[in-house]
Amino acid sequence: MSLNRALIFLGPPGAGKGTQSKRLAAVLGVPHLSTGDMLRDAVVRGSELGRMAAPMMERGELVPDAIVMGMVEERIALRDCAGGFIFDGFPRTIPQAEHLDRILARLGYGKPLVVEFHVSAETLLRRVAGRWTCSVGGETYNVYERPPRVAGICDNDGGKLIQRADDRAEIVRERMAAYERQTKPLADYYRDHGVLEVIDGTAPVEDVHRELLGIVRRTDDKRDGHL
Ligand code: AMP
């Protein structure tokens, strides 16, 4: 199955975007592009961009559109993106979405496919509070829903599991507020463009994955005029 377009995952922190986008990217053989991962990487490397973004990320606020757009534009121009790509945590504002539309048109991609994850507030908090991330490969676990085989150690590569600094309760509240305020309006934006699909993000990981594959297949057939 081919993707050949941009796939966008929309949903608040803890909705399952990271888990599902990494998995789907591996199955479809396309890059998984997490702007949060790119920014955290820039912070660790201490680049100029990282130094600018760090204070905002620590507060749970969004970093300015211009920073993110430059990063994304550079990344999707690389050759490994030619067969399509999956965005995780991008776009997060209407100006980012509008800018992305222009870039995609310029690069010869059609409309993106957008999937919004619906998850109750209670589940979101539990998922974020229980989240541990591998410091080596970035694999995520959850102490309640998906614990590692050995506590504190990644099943895949034996890396040490760490908690993200911005997963602390008071910062999570700010990130949720930023989502409601700045990112949620994107659902209407993409609905108006006729490219929005909605899924139940509380379903088991395997079921959500299968549903996503179904959506990619169904919307691909439609594009080819098979339906
Ligand atoms: P995430 O890993 O997607 O939860 O992102 C972590 C943090 O990185 C966010 O709280 C923001 O500060 C920043 N960030 C990630 N992606 C974006 C984006 N598309 N626009 C603005 N800020 C972002």
Image (cartoon, rainbow, N blue to C red):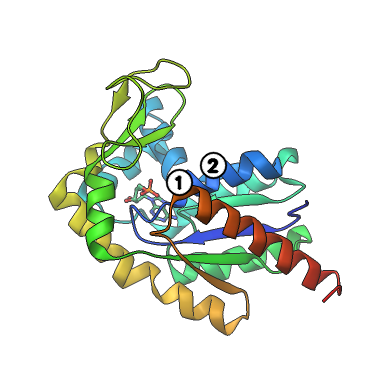
The answer to whether any part of residue 31 appears in the image is: no
x 86%, y 75%: residue: 225
Q: Is mark 1 within 8 Å of ligand 1?
A: yes
Residue 103 horizontal/vertical position (percent): 66, 61
Mark 2 in CB contact with mark 1 (< 8 angstroms): yes
The answer to which image quadrant residue 146 occupies is top left
Element carrying mark 1: helix
What amino acid is found at the position of numbered circle 1 in the picture?
Gly
Q: Which residue is mark 1?
A: 18
Residue closer to the observer: 218 or 163: 218
Element carrying mark 2: helix
Residue 60 horizontal/vertical position (percent): 25, 52
Q: Which residue is mark 2?
A: 22
Q: Answer with left or right where residue 113 lies relative to residue 108.
A: left
Rate crowding at label 2 as few (under 14), some (14 to 19) or many (20 or more) other CA atoms within 10 Å.
Answer: many
Classify the position of the C terminus by image quarter.
bottom right
